[in-house]
Each structure stands twice: as structure tokens, then as C-alpha cells.
Image (cartoon, rainbow, N blue to C red):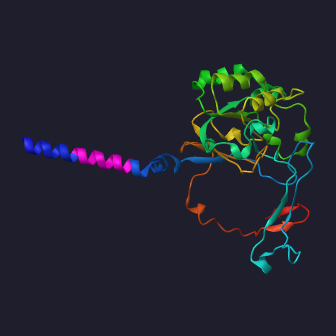
Amino acid sequence: MDTTMRAAVLGLALGAALLSAARAQTDGLWKVYDESLRQAKYIDLTHTIAPNIPVWPGFSPSKFAPAIDPKSKAPYAYAKDGFEATHYDLSTDQLGTQLDPPAHWAPEYPAIDELPASYAVRPLVVISIADEAKKDFGYQMQVSDILAWEKRNGRIPEGSVVFIRSDWSKRWPDPKLATLTKFPGVKLDALVFLHEQRRILMHGHEALDTDTTPNLEGESWLMHHGYAQAEGVANLDQVPEKGCLVSIGFPKFKGGTGGYARYVAICPADWKYGVRIGDKDAPLPKSSRPLHWDERAGMRVR
């Protein structure tokens, strides 16, 4: 190949490389979506909020009602107004699947609206104590459980979210769950290890409290050291120990000391559980059973 031809080939190669780099820079994370997230499996880890779900006895029950037109004093109706809306009388921000900001216990730390947007997507670690909880429903996760997970899977990634599977949520929405003094939890030394030795973003558990100590020492330590936590997480039996991401969503109430959260596990395409992005995502499918207000249930049902 003569010098002129070689220069032409090198020029074409350089041009192709520059074009590829330019496309990558222009497309940004769209390539990640197309190559990974589009084919991924999505698993909801969130309980549905309803008036009858378990809640700490120190809070009053919540109520749903049709939203009222302030002029007519009548509920909005599909037939009359073309739409309906709902009034939610929620007794607490500690309801259902939650995200506790540290201001829940420590006012010098961030409230729910002050949590950074970088919470949105993180690596997800699932540590199971379900077998231990079957033998002892009051089992509290220990550092040894964390080390056993790492022996199988490698070191927990820094900045990850660690959810503790106990299968406590299998009894949901039995209201008696909120009255139990014996339930699976997490020992304080395990929380300290996860945060100070592995530097995780936060942990989460299925029960509505962190541990069974009289003063909730684990939750107290977390909040007073500037850490958030997830509570009331569900469906962890459908998520592998490692390899997934978690999407974290929550409403941004000003000065909120708790948050109704939506956690979604994003798992590899070949995982056996979950749903894929598909044609039925938009438009959404029409139901043969219209949504309607049910007085006995105190909410809209199909």
C-alpha cells in the first residue's frame, strides 16, 4: 500500500472513530437504555397505600374520599364533570412503603425535600435472613450475615442500597403486623458496619421498624448520623442477591419527616421475575371493569 493510500485509510479510520465518539457523546446514556434498560426486568418492591394497611398504633387511621367541588359541595363525577379526583386524609408520612430521611429523628439533618437527586438509581444488594426468621421470627440481622453474603458474592459496592429480606411482608396487609413486638430486624452493629465499613447509601427492611430494641437504637443511630433508610419494602423474594439496580422515587414534601416511596428493582433481562418495557406501556390498556367508588372499602376499586 503506497503512502497516499495508507494516508487515506488512516484518515477514514480516524474519521470513523471521531464520528463514533461524537455519536456517543451526543447519545449520552441513551445507549445504556437501548442496550440494557430496555430489555431489563422491572420488579415493584412497593406496597399499595390504602386506608386499611398496617400503621403504627400511635397514628390515627387514614381515610380516602371523593374530592368535592367547593362551589356545588358535591363530589366530582365522570358523568357530570368528565373527571373524578380523590381527597386523601393521610394521618402520617410514615405510611406503607417508606423512605425515612434523617430529619425524622434529627432536625439538624435533611428532610425529605432536601435529599439529593442522586438517590434516584443505585446498585441493589439483597441480603436474606428469611431462613433465620422462619426459625425465629424475631431474628435480627448480624455482621456475620453480611460477611456470608460477601463470601458468596464479593464486596458490597460503595454507594449501594442494601435491602434485608425477611419475608415479613408476606403477611401484608394484615393490620396486626403493626402491633407485633417480635419481628425480623437489623442489629446496630450490622448497620454501623454497612455504613462505616462498606459506605452504603442506605439500607431497607420489610418491617415497619428497624429493630426490636425498646428505644429503636438502630433507627436512632442512623437518623442522628445523617443516614436515610427504607421501611415496608416488599417482594424481595423475587430479586436476586446481586446484579440489579434500584430506582427510588418519593414525593417532595417541604420539610417532610418521612415519605411515601416507590422502589423498583431493575434486573437483568434473563431474570425469571418482573416485567419488561413493552407496547402496552403507552397507551395503557383499557379495563373491562371501570374504576368506581366503593363506600364499604372507603376507596376506588375495580
- Which is nearer the eye, 31 or 234? 31
* 291 over 116 or under it: above or below: below
In magenta stretch: residue 192: no
Point out residue 73 in the picture as x, y percentages from the top left corner.
89, 75
Q: Residue at x 68, y 30 (%)?
A: 127
Residue 248 drawn at (x, y percent): 66, 45
Q: Main secondary structure of the magenta part?
A: helix
The quadrant holding residue 195 is top right
The residue nearer to you, when weighing 61 against 142, is: 61
Front in this rendered view, residue 144 or 250: 250
Residue 282 seen in the current view: yes
Q: With 266 as the anchor, is 141 left or right in this view?
A: right
Q: Compare residues 276 and 1 and report the one nearer the observer.
A: 1
The stretch in magenta equals 13-24
For the N terminus, the quadrant is top left
Q: Specify the quadrant of the image occupied by residue 292.
A: bottom right
Q: Using the image, determine if residue 77 lies above or below residue 89.
A: below
Vertical relation: 106 (above or below) 255 = above
Q: Quadrant of the C terminus?
A: bottom right
Q: Residue furthest bottom?
A: 80
Residue 40's x, y, as percent? 55, 47
Inspect the magenta stretch and tell me whether residue 21 lies in it.
yes
x 93%, y 42%: residue: 58
Residue that protrudes farthest toward the front in the picture: 108
* Relative horizontal placement of residue 33, taking residue 221 as reference (left or right): left
Note whether 171 is above or below 152 in the view shown: below
